[in-house]
């Protein structure tokens, strides 16, 4: 089993893609580039192309997939479970799978609970990691759910996301809310502003410019009318 497109999109939605090396948190030892590629091969001032970033992500996957795959004889992962844990490992390192499963001794229910606890970086609780763990745990506990509506709601989309889900989101903004966004698959400032306006018009959504589960539910509600 390999990570699916849905799993890659989950990773992309949280990592974002930056073509110049940066430190996601000041205490980190190495720099990050592309879709969250991190390590000693990334240097200050390093720049890459979008094609290189996409290729780097695919090449990076094997070590994290292998970490999850090692426990398949015990758990017999569904695709969604595999995707969620691969995203988890990509963020925390391949050794995190041994930790969160307690080397294969925990049940799937306990694994899902423990996943939610990995939200610190440099000794500090990061809300971005809290959101990511919730998304990963939700995907993990969905089992084999491949319903199109479910997939449409996952993962959360925000600034710097670039994928077909953003293109679908832009299409739905235009179709159901009268926006005039270019359907280019890139979540830029205009798409963010459109989401803010839609959230404000709902009368109850948080106006944060992020397409999360509650905003997705509102989109579906409007589409059904």
Image (spheres, grey):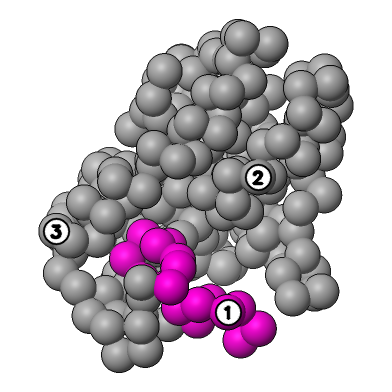
Which labelled disc corresponds to residue 88? none
Q: Is residue 152 magenta?
A: no
Residue sitting nearer the eye, 103 or 51: 103
| Residue identifier under label 1 | 29
Which marked residue is nearer to the observer: mark 1 or mark 3?
Answer: 1
Residue drawn 80% across and 74% down?
A: 124
Secondary structure at numbered mark 1? loop
Which labelled disc corresponds to residue 51? 3
Please tell me how crowded label 3 is: few (under 14), some (14-19), or many (20+) other residues with Cα within 10 Å: few
At which x and y percent is residue 93? 59, 51
Which marked residue is nearer to the observer: mark 2 or mark 3?
Answer: 2
Residue drawn 58% across and 79% down?
A: 29
Secondary structure at numbered mark 3? helix
Pointer 1 or 3: first along the chain: 1
Secondary structure at numbered mark 2? helix
Lateral position of residue 98 relative to residue 177, left or right:
right
The answer for how far apart the CA atoms under marks 2 and 1 are is 18 Å
Q: Residue furthest bottom?
A: 45
Question: For the stretch drawn in magenta, what is the main secondary structure?
Answer: loop
Lateral position of residue 71 relative to residue 170, left or right:
right
Residue sitting nearer the eye, 182 or 48: 48
- Tell me if residue 42 comes above or below residue 221 in the rendering: below
Pointer 2 or 3: first along the chain: 3
């Amino acid at each position: 089993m390999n990570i699916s497109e849905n799993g890659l999109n989950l990773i992309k939605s949280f990592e974002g893609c930056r073509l110049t090396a940066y430190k996601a948190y000041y205490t980190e030892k190495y720099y990050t580039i592309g879709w969250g590629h991190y390590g000693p091969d990334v240097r200050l001032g390093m720049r890459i192309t979008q094609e290189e970033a996409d290729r780097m992500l695919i090449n990076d996957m094997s070590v994290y997939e292998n970490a999850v795959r090692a426990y398949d004889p015990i758990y017999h992962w569904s695709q969604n479970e595999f995707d969620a844990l691969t995203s988890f490992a990509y963020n925390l390192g391949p050794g995190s799978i041994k930790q969160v499963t307690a080397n294969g001794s925990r049940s799937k229910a306990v694994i899902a609970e423990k996943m939610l606890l990995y939200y610190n970086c440099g000794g500090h609780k990061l809300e971005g990691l809290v959101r990511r763990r919730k998304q990963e745990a939700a995907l993990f506990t969905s089992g084999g759910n491949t319903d199109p509506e479910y997939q449409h709601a996952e993962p959360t989309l925000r600034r710097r996301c670039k994928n077909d889900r953003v293109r679908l989101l832009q299409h739905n903004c235009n179709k159901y809310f009268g926006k005039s966004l270019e359907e280019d698959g890139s979540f830029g400032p205009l798409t963010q502003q459109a989401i803010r306006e839609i959230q404000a018009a709902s009368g109850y959504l948080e106006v944060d410019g992020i397409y999360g589960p509650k905003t997705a539910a509102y989109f579906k509600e409007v589409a059904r009318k």
